[in-house]
Image (tube, rainbow, N blue to C red):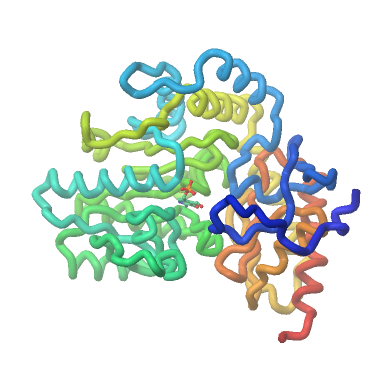
Amino acid sequence: MNAAAHPAVTRPMPHVMNTYGRLPMAVSHGRGCRVWDTEGREYLDALAGIAVNTLGHAHPALVAALQDQVAKVIHCCNYYEIPLQEQLAATLCELSGLDSVFFCSTGLEANEAALKIARKYGHDRGIARPAVIVYENAFHGRSIATLSATGNPKVQKGFEPLVEGFVRVPLNDLSAVEAAARDNPDIVAVFLETIQGEGGVNPARWDYLRGLRKVCNERGWLLMLDEVQCGIGRTGKWFAHQWADVLPDVMPLAKGLGSGVPIGAVVTGPRASGVLGPGNHGTTFGGNPLAMRAGVETLRIMREGGLLEHVAAMGQRLRSGLERELAGVSGVREIRGAGLMLGVELDSPCGVLMTRALQAGLLISVTADRTIRLVPPLVINAGEVDEVVARLCPLVTAFLAEPTP
Ligand SMILES: Cc1ncc(COP(=O)(O)O)c(C=O)c1O
């Protein structure tokens, strides 16, 4: 069936709390980078459930592993040893060069754990009111602490009072960090996304990250890099900060790590690994065998399939295709990002493009009002990359040619 026959009106879900403005499409099943809706229409997925479905949909090796795991044990609480936790933690440490992992189930939980580590790290050093440097346009989650760290008033509005202890600075301005340090002796950590996702696909410059590492070393602060969205191979390295050749002290992960199964992790280096001890932190679901198996298999399949090189090549192809097709189109401000995390910033709000793309059989998102975000499954092939470009660019060009209301 043709995706253009897509209904324009949202179907009601009267018993589901109304926290999302949903598009009128329900995925029935998927395969690789394609999904089909309950009416039989086919779509090309350039969103991956917001950077989650690393291996695409229904990857045969992942499906087999999860079926095997479900038939053995799904959940076992952290009162007991869970060998799959050690297995996944060892791989994450090997890939990151860090040395310890706490497992949870979502990105915000990973960030909560990171913030608790920062505060406890401060208390352990005699700082009674530890503060953390955070960023304009950052997004770290929607719990009370993580929305307080988030740099978007729309996310915070209505949930005040916000958690205290955050000092906000602009991205990529080292002098702002140095000024904050001079004004506030209670700072214990710097917390940022290596590439801001929800804030509009804004990369931290590699030299800026190296500068932050230096400041953190000089001042004894923790460098905490939120790689919930940009980690796990998305940029063509295991972790986006590896392009800058720096090591964080704390790295929250989630999204792509389980290829669709909910999972979160905080990976820490020597300065932070011993900060939390028994009784300081915990979660019922975190580290359960099903999620751990999903993480183990995702990383194994990525490694065995040489997925990092593939992401680098496909990312380059996607970027070149967008640059070629949108060259000279008035209203395209910038194409930016790394690997398969790309943003196309327009000069006007373009949320409507999500619906138009859906109608054209393409799943994308728009962040920060005017940035089209492309974060497809990492297994996307060259033909599919070309198809994303071919479906998206005419929509963008037509949108920008419309008279402004
Ligand atoms: C960088 C970053 N951190 C944290 C989160 C929150 O993750 P979750 O939605 O799993 O709580 C997100 C979600 O988009 C994110 O992009």
Figure check: 64 above or below 221: above
Q: Quadrant of residue 139?
A: bottom left
Figure check: 55 above or below 243: above
Residue 54, x across and y down, in percent: 62, 38
Q: Quadrant of residue 219?
A: bottom left
Residue 116, x across and y down, in percent: 26, 46
- Residue at horizontal 19%, vertical 45%? 121
Residue 252, x across and y down, in percent: 40, 43
Q: Name, please, the residue furthest toward the top.
A: 72
Q: Name, please, the residue furthest toward the right.
A: 1
- Residue at horizontal 34%, vertical 24%? 78
Q: Is residue 305 left or right of residue 283?
A: right
Q: Name, please, the residue furthest toward the left.
A: 126
Residue 110, x across and y down, in percent: 39, 43
Q: How many callouts does the rendering have?
A: 0
The front one of 305 and 7 is 7
* Residue 168 seen in render: yes
* Residue 171 seen in render: no
Quadrant of the snapshot with the C terminus: bottom right
- Residue at horizontal 63%, vertical 50%? 375
